[in-house]
Amino acid sequence: MSKKYYLWTALLLTLLIVAFIIHHKSDGVFGEANSSPASGNNSVTGELSQSDRVIFYSTEENGMKYNLTLCFDDTATIRYHFVISRDSDAIIELVDRAVSDPQTSYTIRGKYGFLFSARRFEASEDDQITGIFLQQGDSSYASLNYYSPPLNDQVYALLKDIPVMFRNTEEPYREYLEGIIAALVEYHSKISASNETEQRESHYQSTYDEKLSDLRALLTEIKNKKISFGALNNDQLLDQVIFYGMDSVQRIFENYGVEFRVDSSLVITESQLVPYQTDDHILVTVQTDKTGKIINDRFLRIDKTANLERPLILRIGELPYFGTTRDFKDYGDKTLAVFRDFGFESVNHLISVWDKQQDGYRLSAILNSSVSVGIGGVSLDTLIRISPNKYLIIGEKSGGDAGDTWGALWVGRWTLPRQFEMVYEKNWRGSEEQRFIENISYSISKDTIMKVVWEKGHSLNFSDSLVNEESIDLKGFK
């Protein structure tokens, strides 16, 4: 045969080979199925990086690297390229399409226990993929289940579940934190419930401990990535920890250097100060736990009610109280002020301690327990020092509704700087309809003996009332 014939034959064969390669390469989703795995950059090779609907995930665990890239063909079909590698060698590489099952919804446990509702995409050809789950709606989660027989020696294949993210956005650590704290609150409440069986409480405790482990892992990852916790923080997260009394969670946060909020920016120019010339109602807020104990030794805010934005937005555990400078009472070098909350059936009254300075009252302490009365008010009367670090506060409370009246004489022990507890209470009541009244009065002698006089009788002839007296040694309340 002539040289020209061989040249034409070689050229034709070359064209056939090129056509064959092009044809079969187009059958793959992202190029050759056995190409080396992605190195962990922001995309794998080929057309996928040009798509505006790409989901990408890359992570390392126990020396194994996982790379997953997804791309939507349409709303019901996605393409995926999944690679597991060790030391740059691909152990598993899967390339296929998956089709959505629009009738089925799943709840998936993602990273750090985060739960999300998802729709399932079934692999169309490769039975190693059992399902790809994408969160419903516009969000940042997906999950992949796959079998990997080469990774273990058991008869049954290993089922792996990993969370993935849309695009290459930062992991949603704040949502992780919110999910973990919400779960901790849930199981902490279940553990403390009195109507659960021992078996159920054990289950709740083990789940709670599992969530604590998730929290430690999450905070470790945040710390290792040098992410500022302040940028992720939401006051509500830490406030929930305090409000529900989850001491173990608080210790974990503190071990990672997370500081709990003590007070917020105050509207009054100089923090924790009430000027003498303030005639308007003053609003203060405090942080409490679920038992009503006041946690912080400072107010979260102080403001004139006239300056408040409406509606008043409160954090969890934040309670508002109000009063005026007329509620401030001087006792030598101490000034006490009572603020009341916005309740009606039960009205809590907060006692605070102030120092008088040239420009106004400066806060010294907030006593950690309030005094409550139904449909009424609380007043302070006497302050007595019984030891170097303890005072007794004597006051009254009174209320009434529909012709009925009630109240009490009370004594509270204040241990510096802010511990407060009720140590004595004598109640009285009356009825306008029944013309029945009671009255309580007291006097104190120099040796701190309190004489309490209690009278009970008919309003038309109160001079014939029943009178009882008791003497109380106030030093006994030390």
Image (cartoon, rainbow, N blue to C red):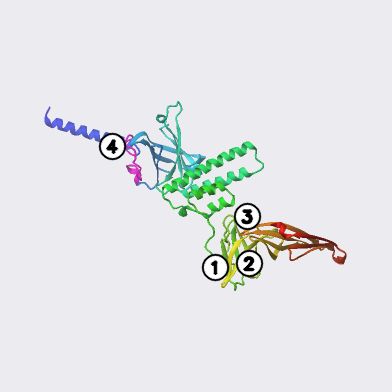
Instruction: Name the mark nearer the viewer: 2 or 1.
Output: 2
Report x, y in % for residue 137: 48, 47
Q: Amino acid at mark 3?
A: Lys
Identify the secondary structure beneath mark 2.
strand
Of residues 155 and 299, which is closer to you in this image?
299
Q: Is residue 356 above or below residue 49?
A: below
Report x, y in % for residue 74: 41, 43
In magenta, the rendered stretch is 30-49
Query: Label 2, on which residue?
Result: 334
Left or right? Give the position of 300 relative to 140: right
Please report whichever mark, 4 or 2, sits nearer to the chain's N-terminal start.
Answer: 4
> Could you give the CA–CA distance between mark 3 and mark 4, rounded to whole angstroms?
74 Å
Please report whichever mark, 3 or 4, sits nearer to the chain's N-terminal start.
Answer: 4
Dot 1 alpha-carbon crowd within 10 angstroms: few under 14, some 14 to 19, many 20 or more: some
Query: Label 4, on which residue?
Result: 22
Q: Is residue 434 visible to us here?
A: no
Identify the secondary structure beneath mark 4.
helix
Please report whichever mark, 2 or 3, sits nearer to the chain's N-terminal start.
Answer: 3
Q: Residue at x 59, y 40 (%)?
A: 204
